[in-house]
Image (tube, rainbow, N blue to C red):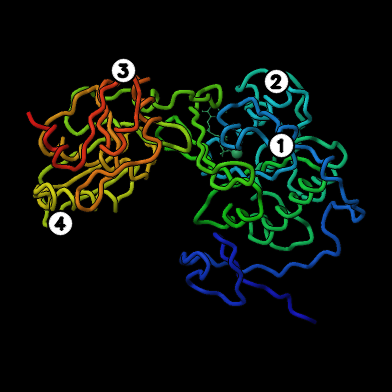
Amino acid sequence: MAKNKTVFFCKLCGFESAKWVGQCPGCKEWDTFAEEPVLKKSSKPAGIKNTREPELLSNIKTESELRIHSGIEELDRVLGGGIVTGSLVLVGGDPGIGKSTLLLQMCREIVGKSKKVLYISGEESLSQIKMRAERLGVFNGELLLLCETNLELIEETIHKYNPDIVVIDSIQTMSRDEISAAPGSVSQVREVTSALMQIAKGFGITVFIIGHVTKEGVVAGPRVLEHMVDTVLYFEGDNYAAYRVLRAVKNRFGSTNEIGVFEMQGTGLVEVKNPSEFMLKGRPEGEPGSVVAASIEGTRPILIELQALVCRTNFNMPRRTAAGTDYNRVNLLMAVLEKRAGIQLSDYDAYVNVAGGMRITEPALDLAVITAILSSYKNVALDNKTVLFGEVGLTGEIRAVNMAEQRVAEASKMGFEVCILPQANKEHIKVPGIKLIGVKNIQEVMGMLKR
Ligand code: TYD
Ligand code: MG
């Protein structure tokens, strides 16, 4: 009798190998390989008819006809202007971050527009979903709910009810009978996703897939299916902060830089229309080491508070930490300060933190990092109504950044009176009501932090 063949898969990226390897050649992570049985190739892919006629180009619907507005502005923006009919969208994130809540809220909005929505849960019972729905408010329409994990039965239900939108919560609980691997294994996750793709593309049904991000454990991460789907959204946030950021990391129908900001409240997720105000809440006034930076996320300017604490070290090696921004970048900027501004920072510990738990890595934050470190080192506070942005080069020069006008406009809108920015940007900006100070190098910035 022939032995059942098995292969090894990387649980993170899906790399396939005939034998076990310690480090994945695909994503270079260690100890991610797991053994799984080889798939039986099924004779026909699920749910697709073989008789297809070519279509006239002029008869095919245009983009505006194909988009459904979800009613949640922050979600629509991240999707590139609404939900595209027949697309396959993956919503990934840590367990408990609010993925089910977000999609149930989306369903609530869409059933109100008399669209047919089918929510399939493999994680919660019908009464648990009902309890959650009751917290979210009144549904102005009927939502179809199904608790099922067997893909064949799910396909039958979809064909029977023919909904406009299907939500699968979550991909890690779904399985196909003919594959012997456990639910959540790489082969199950892949097969189920490809079957869902047939449903989306073949019948024009939009499918949202929820996927838990896990590094450890037995379930395959959403990265395995990133390349199969049209759009990948990640829902992220600090476990200790109430706000959540929805970020597009792949989008066939729009830009990938956009973010949506939400706050988790007792009645579900509430859109944060003005993230700057949210991020600056509770900011200390006139404290050394705290500055406000104008940053850009996607096409949206966001003001954030950047804090630094510089104090004498008790060890031979000074400690450095960077929360919410790039650690290596902070080290580099401190080296620039040592060399170009002549400040002996090697005897000092430095802690840099983007307040509010937001993660920002753009170089336009450099000037704020440098100024916050200088401000804490000299124990001199920067003026309370001052905002800054600019990239710092290795010779200590302040370089121009993109979208400077939008940054200044946001600062002015939020009531700031002075903006310190690269000299090269200053010349092109006309925003009334805010004083612009152009700087060329970090020595000029140091001059502003005199007592
Ligand atoms: P959930 O959507 O179940 O997360 P996921 O599907 O990503 O695992 O969100 C669970 C968390 O959200 C839970 O800790 C409770 C919290 N929550 C609220 O704070 N308010 C609410 O109205 C709801 C529905 C959930
Ligand atoms: Mg959930």
- Residue at the disc numbered 3: 433
Q: Which residue is mark 1?
A: 63
Helix, strand or loop at mark 3: loop
Mark 1 vs 3, N-terminal side: 1
Query: Residue at position x 68%, y 61% from top?
Result: 187
**Circle 4 sits on which residue?**
317
Residue at x 62% of width, y 55% of height: 227
CA separation in Å, label 2 and label 3: 45 Å
Q: Residues within 10 Å of mark 2 (few under 14, many from 20)?
A: some
Say few, some or many: other residues with alpha carbon within 10 Å of mark 3 (under 14 / 14 to 19 / 20 or more): few
Asked if ligand 1 lies within 8 A of label 3, the reply is: no
Label located before the other in sequence (3 or 4): 4
Disc 3 vs disc 4: which is toward the camera? 3
Callout 1, which amino acid? Glu
CA gap, disc 3 to disc 4?
A: 46 Å
Mark 4 residue type: Met
Task: Tell me the CA gap for discs 4 and 1.
Answer: 58 Å
Q: Position of residue 36 (x, y in %)?
A: 65, 67
